[in-house]
Amino acid sequence: MTAQDPNHSHPPARTRFAPSPTGYLHLGGLRTALFSWLWARHTGGQFILRVEDTDRRRYVPDSLDDILQGLRWLELHWDEGPDIGGPYGPYVQSQRTALYREHAEQLIASGHAYRCYCTPERLAALREEQQRRGERTGYDRHCRSLSPEERAAKEAQGLPHVVRLAVPLEGTTTVHDLLRGPIVTDNRQLEDAVLLKSDGMPTYHLAVVVDDHLMAITHVLRGQEWLPSAPLHQLLYDAFGWEPPVWVHLPVILDPSGRGKMSKRRKVVDGKEYLALVREFMEAGYLPEALFNFLVNVGWNFDPEREVFTREEAIQRFELQEIHPAPAALPYEKLEWLNGVYIRQMDPTELKRRLLPFLSRQLGIPEEDLAGDSRLDRLVPLIQERIKRLDEAAPWLDWAFVDADALPYESPNVLLGRKLSPEQSLAVLRKGHEILQQVEPFQADAIQAAFRAAAQEMGIKAGSFFGPFRGALTGKRVSPPLFESMEALGREQVLRRVERAIQALEAQLQRTP
RNA sequence: GCCCCCAUCGUCUAGAGGACUAGGACUCAGGCCUUUCAAGCCUGCAACAGGGGUUCGAAUCCCCUUGGGGGCGCCA
């Protein structure tokens, strides 16, 4: 049995998702969280949430809520985290600053790090000069070679300082990425990165290494943009004498045009708008189970012959080694299709329940009123196979929730049957009105049978005969199935609408004799 | 500019040297069904980036080129 055997069992893994509260959750972040969660669940381990809030300047107050909400929406529940605690807390980096300082001191003492007193101005000037000369930008290690006397003098002045990693001047550093194998970096390509900022906060490099180790994280899944700094992290693990976790650098998600990393803003390509934030997908009426299914199949493949699967099945089959390391553009049309698949296979009662907030908002009707409206129970199954997103239901159903008098016949053409003149359409409506008054029971089958008979009698194709009623009922050319819609509306409303349509057509004929 | 990663239909992907006439899905096109629109069913279009090796045999292994992506902050 090889390590790549899908049936190979793995020891319980501890994975984490470590967002920074500097912006709203986007699909790239959600995918990283999803894969981390999947691996923890697959191995029967733990999924940890940690907040990396060490950048005070970029902090966005409601972003953490947004992130937690997004994860909960997809039901990626964490076993340890800032809100629920756990044995390795606290899970918020700003509450762990003492830990980082201690570890930075430890590195200084062991000669793996040093204090640097260079001012931001000096660094900016240095970078500018390097760029002007076309050199690789980076710190020139000015403070690394300070003598003890010089250091003491700077200290005596009380100068602000950072702590930098003393990268070996020679040799190579090897990072083992699960998907790519060993990656060897010449240490001369590496910078003496800042570990502790002058405000006492750690940078990502220090914090992530200290926390992942202290929290006993076994597998680090993160975006590929971290690959270039992974050697730094390896060096830190070496300096501390710790064993690094398994690193899995996930392929970046490209924006829909396929060029460039997906941004956090919705993107317009060829006139189509592509969402980026998880909250936008929620608001647009995508189902979490569909988004879950969709995201799992980008960068990994559940089964070459099967597109639709449950989360339990995904947990069971998921394997880190099978992740495809190439960057991928999100196939949005596939998400649209998948969402439709999930809507269609949903229990209609459940669909109605999920539709309520959307219909309420879009139709301006309180949710409670809609929930108790029996018309909706009849109507929802009719649109179930016609919508791909929950926000598409309202335009299919709005006509049913206005009074007959309020229904606009904006284009008189909606009242005309296909290939029928206004006069013929009027005759059809009058005939139908008669039928609708008498037909018993007022149910789809009975109405349809009567209508078909009438159509045949008049020598009109059934489809053409039905057209004027579709318009009369809904004010639209496209609607849910006609007879079921009639049944849902009830005889009285249907008759009033047909009467109004007859009046409208009569008025039109008088105007244009 | 320097460093790194990646490379199969338009897109997401299957493919672990012979089972490849390169499979599936979305999209698109055509057809069937039909009460509008959908849904469903059927059919079709469509890819191994290029060049060198290795091998009896390469989509698969190696090298180069090209292309794409990422990174080079007291951001994460």
Image (cartoon, coloured by chain):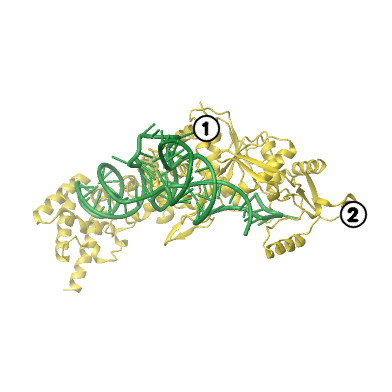
Chain colours: A yellow, B green
Disc with the residue nearer the chain's start (2 vs 1): 1
Which residue: 69% across, 64% down?
A133
Question: Crowdedness of circle 2 by 10 Å Cα count: few (<14), some, many (20+)?
Answer: few
Towards the viewer: A452 or A100:
A100
Q: Quadrant of residue A126?
A: bottom right
Q: Is residue A366 visible?
A: no
Locate residue A342, reporting x and y percent.
39, 43
Disc 1 marks a residue whose amino acid type is His
Q: Which residue is mark 1?
A: A42
Q: Comparing marks 2 and 1, which lies closer to the viewer?
A: 2
Q: Is residue A117 above or below residue A16?
A: below
Towards the viewer: A124 or A314:
A124
Q: Which mark is residue A153?
A: 2
**Element under disc 2:** helix
Locate residue A145, reporting x and y percent.
83, 51
Q: Which mark is residue A213?
A: none
**Element under disc 1:** helix
Question: Crowdedness of circle 1 by 10 Å Cα count: few (<14), some, many (20+)?
Answer: many
Locate residue A424, reporting x and y percent.
14, 63
Give the Cα separation between the discs numbered 2 and 1.
56 Å
The answer to whether A377 appears left or right of A253 in the picture is left
Count how many numbered circles sit on residues in the image. Answer: 2
Quarter containing the C terminus of chain A: bottom left
Disc 2 marks a residue whose amino acid type is Ala
Which chain does tag 2 point to?
A
Locate residue A89, reporting x and y percent.
68, 37
Q: Is residue A183 visible?
A: yes
**In contact (CB < 8 Å): disc 2 and disc 1:** no
Which residue: 75% across, 47% down?
A169
